[in-house]
Structures are given as C-alpha cells and as structure tokens.
Image: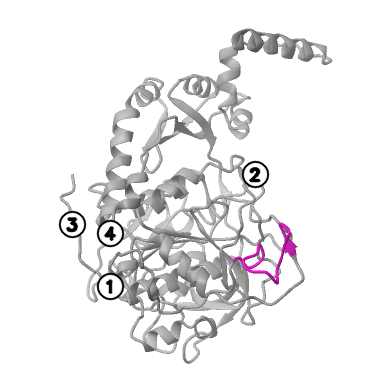
Amino acid sequence: MSTNLSEFAILYLQFLLALLPNFTPAVALSATELDWTAKVDPWVAASVASGATAEFVVFLKEQADLSGAATLPTKGEKGYYVFSQLTALAERSQEPVLNEIRARGLLHRPYWIANMIWVTGSQADVAALASRNDVHRINANPLTALEKSQLMSDQHRIGGPEASLVHIGATDLWAAGFTGQGVVVAGADTGYDWTHPALRDQYRGWDGSSETHDYNWHDSIHSGGGICGADSPFPCDDNNHGTHTMGTMAGDDGGSNQIGVAPGARWIGCRNMDQGNGTPITYSECFQFFLAPTDLNDQNPNPLLAPDVINGSWSCPDFEGCTDPEVLRTVVENVRAAGMVVVQSAGNAGSGCSTVDTPAAIYDAAFTIGAVDLSDQIASFSSRGPVAIDGSNRLKPNVSAPGVGIRSSVLGDSYSTFNGTSMAAPHVAGVIALLISADPSLSGHPDALEQHLMDTAVDGVTVAQSCGGTPDTVFPNNTYGYGSVRAAIPTNLFADGFESGDTTLWSATLP
C-alpha cells in the first residue's frame, strides 16, 4: 500500500506542477529521484543546479554508538575508546563511498570525527552520492562568518589582574594554589599568535627554549589564509580574534598583564576560520584534531594528548549556509563522549528571545555561554533562548560570564578591549581549568564540571524579560541560564563513589 500511495503522490505532484504557467518538466520524477533529492541540502542543490561545482559533506547513514564511554572512569580511557570506535567505523564503512568518489575523480577528504567525507562535485556527482543507500545526507559547506565582536579601544599595560578575573573569583582560586596547572585548554578560532608575551610560556609546544608544534597546533584552512597563508606549520592568527580569546583563557606575560583566568594551564590551538570565515568541515576538522592530536603531517593521532576543555567563540548561521541545524551535532556529541567540555559562545544576536539559533551553541552537548557586564547584568547583544530552530525548546544559555569591556591580547604584542559572547566563553573555559587543577579527578567528566558551574552561578540583574515563559527573576532562565559564573573550589562532586582526587594515569598502546 505504501508503494501505491507513493506513486499516487508523485503523479499528483506532477499534475500540480503541470498546471504552473510555462512549466515543462525536464524529466519525469520517480520515487528514487524524490528519495535522493530529499537528502540534499537546499544550498547544495541550488549551487550545483546551474552546472557549477560546490563543496559539500557526505554524511553517512551509519554513525558510531559511543554510549560505552560513559561508564569509563578516566578521560584517557574515554578518549581512547571513542577514538577507536570512530576510526574503526570510518575504516570499515567509508571505502565503498570513497571508491565511487575516486572513480569520479573528485576532490575529497574523509573524516572520522563523524562518519563523513568532504567532497567537491557537480550536480551529477551529488545525485549519484545521494542515491546511495549508505548515505544519509548531503550537507552544505559554504563559508560561514565569525560572530563579530566589537572592538572598543586599544589599551596599554595596566597593573594587576583584569577586573573580570577578580569579579568571577579566579584570583581567589589562585590564592588557594590553583591556577590551572596540569590542565590543557584548547581553542578553535582564527588562530593564535603563539609568540605573544602573554601566550608563549603557556603554549604546550614551548619548553622555555625551543618549540614543537606537533600535537599542539593544527590548521584546517587549506587554501587562502590571509597573512598566515594556508596550512600554517605554526600557530598563526589572521584576524586577532583567536589571540584575544586565548588570552582570556590562559594569558599572562609574567608582569603587569594578568589577563587569563587560568595562567597555569597549557594551551593548544587549531585555526578553523579563514580570516574570520569558516565552514562546517573546518569546524569539524578542528574538533577531530582535539579528540586525537596529530603531528604536523596529520599522522600518528594520539587521544591521550587531548585537551580537557575546548573553547568555541564562533557561530554557523543558517543564512550563511548552515541551513541544517543538525549539521555539527554528531561531531560535538562525539567530542563530549571523549570527556572534553565543549564551551560555546551563545552569539551576539540579542536581545530578542530564541536568538540562540546557530550551531554549535544550540546543542545539548555544548555548554553555551551568555555575556554579562561586571554588575552581572545581561549584555543587550547576548543571545537568548529557548532554542526554537530545532524544535527542542532547550534552555540556553547554560550560564553567563563577563563579556563587556574585556581586555586581552591581540596581534603585535598588544592588548585591546572587546565586547561579545566570544569574550564570555573563554572565561568559563578558564574556570573549568581552575576546577580541574583543584580536583584532577574532574578531568574527563563534563557532567560534573558543568553541574558545579550551574550550582555555583549567581543570579543576574533583573531586566524584566521572559523568554520561553520563564521570567528572568526565576533561575534558570533563557536570559542568563543558571546565572553568572563563579570560580569556587569543588567539593563532594563524586558522591556516587568515584574517588575525588584520584589522579592515577591511564595509558594504552596506540595503533
């Protein structure tokens, strides 16, 4: 019966189209054709319709079940398990699709962070790949622009910690001996000026006398790249934005510029935007690098060198190509399954409700951050929830942090003050580093870390806004989330029996 109904629907659709003036169908529609066209993102279909080629992502139907990672006690075990599952699936399932792609002579690059392949091809190539039973969807991969942060003014050296660090209590944890030591933070952004005086000593690739960028840096920009060029062999920033966000996470020049929440942490980086413009695949490639860092030849991946927390101060809006809100969800979920916290800026589209509407801020697996000033009042530009674009009505942001008048590092060994949720997110990533340095057993446990941050957040200032039916006098809400973040020493987070303070290292022989 379903076949007869499908045939009837096709005939009826053809009848309706024939009634349109000047419409002449080029070919008769078949059930198979309707099936494959439904798999293709509208941007891809429009881009190849005129005979041009376009970049797109072939997302395979089979994706890894990583639920087993949740029962593993350490970050090392989680990371190795997730890496092994993802790479085994890609090796087993991608070859038939790759054979067809190679036979067509198409530019392509396979990925395992989700089971997917980046391809450049024509309409005929799209049709052939989308018609395959093992292909779930053909996703768009156009350039997407950085969520712009507002430059306020150039600033020069000042004395003491930045006001935002004092405000959130970071300096209290410093005084208790916890500065992020033993923790690795990661940034995926416009790149990083690693020789900046506030960043060099914290870079994991610098030992005080020489540098090594293997396992500490990856460039997902393979053409263009502005002042850095493509495939930069060392950390380079073509925009300023990344250098600023990393400074807020871990920056300190050893003198009067105390700009970072966790100056005792080490950092690694990945460039996922070309002069402020990224694509779903460049974002995904950086997540893949963080899950299992590689050498500069993209070889010998090692999940035991993965960071504890990843900061993402970017967005992927639908009007610039991310028309499918699910496009990065599997990637972010897989990274979280490996024990890393994915901290994501909420976006600067406020003050309306349901303006948290772009990947990756919309996902449950991302810890999404709004922006407040130093009075804990929400910034007018900070995006609000609930998440409507995917129908989830999910509460967002999760928490808020200082994002107004934030002074940090920029190119040229300088410092400038920016506004934006891009500035708020690295405050939270830094606080996570402080928490792990206070209790190393928290590494690899995103749920416990995020719950602690939500439990210790303070209420924001009432601005008489009710998004999703929850007034901002009730917490959590869709304006502030659970409130404005505070750094507080964690206690009794593992009442379920997992030993707090257990820092036993786990190791494995890598393939």
Residue type indicated by callout 2: Gly
The disc at residue 507 is: 3
Say whether marks 4 and 3 touch (CB < 8 Å): no
Question: Callout 1: helix, strand or loop?
Answer: loop
Residue type indicated by callout 1: Gly
Mark 2 or mark 4: name the one nearer the start of the chain. 4
Question: Callout 4: helix, strand or loop?
Answer: loop
Task: Give the number of the mark in front: 4 or 3.
Answer: 4
Which residues lie in the magenta part? 466-481
Q: Is residue 90 left or right of residue 386?
A: left
Q: Residues within 10 Å of mark 1 (few under 14, many from 20)?
A: few
Residue marked by disc 1 = 501
Question: Callout 2: helix, strand or loop?
Answer: loop
Q: Residues within 10 Å of mark 3 (few under 14, many from 20)?
A: few
Question: Callout 3: helix, strand or loop?
Answer: loop
- Vertical arrangement, residue 256 with respect to residue 84, above or below: below
Residue marked by disc 2 = 391
* Farthest bottom residue in view: 159
Q: Is residue 350 left or right of residue 97?
A: right
Q: Name the residue rendered at 49%, 82% in the picture.
A: 165
Name the quadrant of the N terminus.
top right
